[in-house]
Image: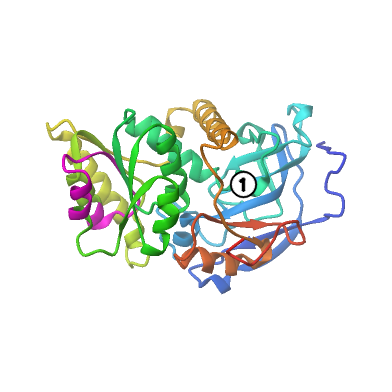
Amino acid sequence: MGTAAASGTAGATRLVEVVLPGTVEPEGLEIRHREIPVPGPGQIVVRMEATGVSFAEQQMRRGRYYDQPPFPFVPGYDLVGTVVTAGEGVTPGLVGERVAALVKVGGWASHVLLDAADAVAVPAGIGAAEAETLVVNGITAWQMLHRKAGVREGGTILVHGANGGVGTVLVQLARAAGLRVIGTASVRHHDALRELGVTPVDYRAADVPARVRELAPGGVDAVFDHLGGRSVVDSWKLLAPGGTLVSYGSATTRDDSGSKQWPVLKILGRVWLWNALPNGRHAFFFNVWAGRAFGKDRFRARLSADLTQVFEALWRGEVSAHIAARLPLTRAAEALRLAESGTVTGKVVLVPDGGDGATADPAR
């Protein structure tokens, strides 16, 4: 039998979740109510305080995320919330604590059932929405920068989509590590990037690679590319000797038809070929879940350690939480539309209906 926190699920007798029924427009999302689950051994139930809209959900609603589950399912890549019940074998002190979790799907719900081992403590003094902006985005940025690229202080990197959820965190972590950062984004975001110490490049310019070469004639030490397609080839060519390409998506193929695996397989094929060339440069396709192949316990330990580092960077002021908007969970369609618009900087966050801080104003 699970134990409940003192505040527990008082006033909450039913779970509210957002369901993606198929390849629909955002307005086709469905709201469903069901019983709040009871945690089994080693499990917890987290009352969601903030969950996010990432690029993954944008691909999933099109059926374009390469390893998404079959429809229907509840999207939501990550969340932050308070542990309200715990099953047998869970440390009693975990109930009542604020935690973060990376789940891939299931986060767009008022209550989420998790393995306790997947929960990462959120330090006191960090708000739920602020922490949420740094879960999947922070883990992705930290591991790509520090575990894959490993650029030394004083090096130069190129970040595509520097105004996006991952990009915004990545450029701040890079600046904190003493790196020079060139970032692509639309002109409307250039002033914000300059404030972060980034040299902006208009991604709509006629020849982005030529502009980057002007800024870094000898090449860059690392490129972080979420675009895929032709961009990943250009990114490889921009590397300096000994440089590293980290590809982590195929955004340019988001609206394509056909196989959802093919764009990723093409990148993987290029990565394999490039790494076989005797030129000293390296290429990776980054998938935050790839580490699970080396063991669940090791994956969890690394994720917890890295996310804790990101939260500490936030606490030190090296990273700021860029919240594009806070919207109630039941307005997920509006939140998804906003995230897909490409007009905002940072992350669109969903919060519980009736909760504090919900606003439809992206400027806040």
Residue 162 in picture, x, y percent from top left: 39, 51
The answer to whether one can see residue 198 in this image is: yes
Position of 265 relative to 92 (above/below): below
Find the magenta span and give its range: 210-231
Is residue 104 highlighted in magenta?
no
Mark 1 surroundings: few (<14), some (14-19) or many (≥20) residues within 10 A: some
Is residue 225 highlighted in magenta?
yes
Query: Dividing the picture into quarters, in which one does residue 93 lie?
Result: top right
Left or right of residue 82: residue 309: left
The answer to whether one can see residue 259 in this image is: no
Left or right of residue 286: residue 279: left
Instruction: Decide which of 90, 250 is in the foreground and name it.
Output: 250
Left or right of residue 206: residue 258: right
Which residue reaches farthest left?
278
Query: Dividing the picture into quarters, in which one does residue 206 lie?
Result: bottom left
In the image, what residue occupies the spot 29% across and 33% down?
155
Left or right of residue 364: residue 199: left
Query: Dividing the picture into quarters, in which one does residue 75 lie?
Result: bottom right
Residue 182 in picture, x, y percent from top left: 31, 47
Residue 22 in picture, x, y percent from top left: 51, 67
User: What colouring method underlies this structural image?
Assistant: rainbow
**Three-letter amino acid code at the position of disc 1:** Glu
- Label 1 SS: helix
Instruction: Decide which of 24, 83 is in the foreground and name it.
Output: 83
The residue carrying mark 1 is 130
In the image, what residue occupies the spot 47% across and 44% down?
169
